[in-house]
Amino acid sequence: MPHLAVIGAGNVAWHLAPALETAGHPVTEVYSRSLNTADLLARRLYQAAPTQHLDFRQSPAQVFLLCLADDAYPAVLPQLRLPPGAILVHTSGPLPTQLLAPYCPQFGVLYPVQTFSKARAVNLAQVPFCIDASDAPTEQLLVALASGLSQQVYALDSTERQRLHLAAVFANNFTNYLLHAADQLLAAGQLPPTLLQALVAETVAKAQALGPAAAQTGPARRGDTEVLAKQEAWLQAHYPSLAGVYRTLSAEILKFYHQKPI
Ligand SMILES: NC(=O)c1ccc[n+]([C@@H]2O[C@H](COP(=O)([O-])OP(=O)(O)OC[C@H]3O[C@@H](n4cnc5c(N)ncnc54)[C@H](OP(=O)(O)O)[C@@H]3O)[C@@H](O)[C@H]2O)c1
């Protein structure tokens, strides 16, 4: 079983490092630019040493798992020093696999299709993992790593993974933003957030059961332009930043179901 070093100690590292260790891959080092942050993650592991340095030439690890913010890669990669035989792996949806080619002969991607925050446990057994690799032996190793976490392992190239990540932005990030907007509207009206909980749970369950196109309801789906105009005007007066979102989404729903502009 190859040993791992984890580079980055944010949300993804927080969940993947202990899970990989439990699956039989000891983590030997945790890098963060803050030693304190590296130490917090290292304490979740058996024997990992926290480090602030990117010189891993003496590391016993073989796999170097990058869990960095996407925009940190240009600054961090040129500073990395790896031992012979190292395999460099990133965990990003949008970044191409070839980004790693100048820094290590063997490289790949292990992208988990889930939302991770330190504060929330995740059942990795239910998470699809997308892998990509520079060569067949590296791909086999990544399949073995991912299979230790989940039965759902997919080989996707960079273009496919970027498309998947874009879809995930719509499914998760935008949905979550809209849930936050809904919470704000309730709170401003002194209404409890629990009023929407059953609706939110059923929205996801129904979309998965019927397909989202068949599951849609509401004023734009019904083509009720009078309600749409009133709600948009009210938002414009009270929450102008939400009025644009409301208009754009309602117009798209109207176009999709009725082929007519708002
Ligand atoms: N979170 C998710 O739901 C999720 C899901 C799938 C894939 N991913 C991918 O996983 C990767 C990590 O995401 P994350 O959510 O774990 O991010 P994160 O919680 O923001 O952690 C990012 C890590 O990168 C470090 N970092 C940022 N800028 C740096 C720099 N200039 N130099 C050195 N270190 C730097 C941060 O250090 P500090 O703590 O010091 O800022 C932190 O350790 C990304 O590629 C993301 O696309 C994320």
Image: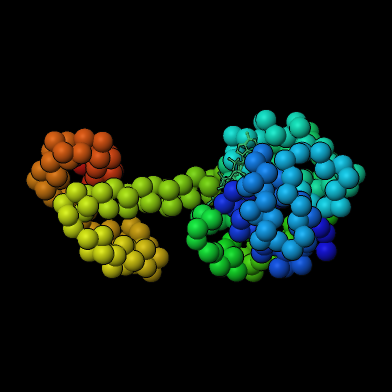
In the rendered image, is residue 85 in sight?
yes
Residue 72 coordinates in the image, percent (x, y) = 62, 35
The residue positioned 39% from the left and 47% from the top of the image is 174
Residue in the foreground of this view, choosing between 223 and 151: 151
Question: Residue 161 at x, y = what percent?
Answer: 59, 47
Tell me the residue at 74%/45% (across/down). 51
Query: x, y percentage for residue 184?
Result: 26, 49
**Colouring scheme applied when the structure was drawn:** rainbow
| Direction from residue 141 to residue 94 in the image, left or right | left
Image-quadrant location for residue 45: bottom right
Q: Is residue 15 left or right of residue 78?
A: left
For the C terminus, the image quarter is top left
Q: Ligand 1 is located in which of the four quadrants?
A: top right
Foreground: 22 or 52?
52
Instruction: State left or right for residue 96 relative to residue 210.
Output: right
Q: Is residue 115 above or below residue 202?
A: above
As displayed, is residue 60 above or below residue 105?
below
Give the tally of numbered discs: 0
Q: Is residue 110 visible?
A: no
Query: Looking at the image, which residue is at 26% across and 64% down?
Result: 194
Residue under the point 68% across and 44% down: 35
Instruction: State which quarter of the image contains the N terminus.
Output: bottom right
Residue 214: x percent and y percent?
31, 61
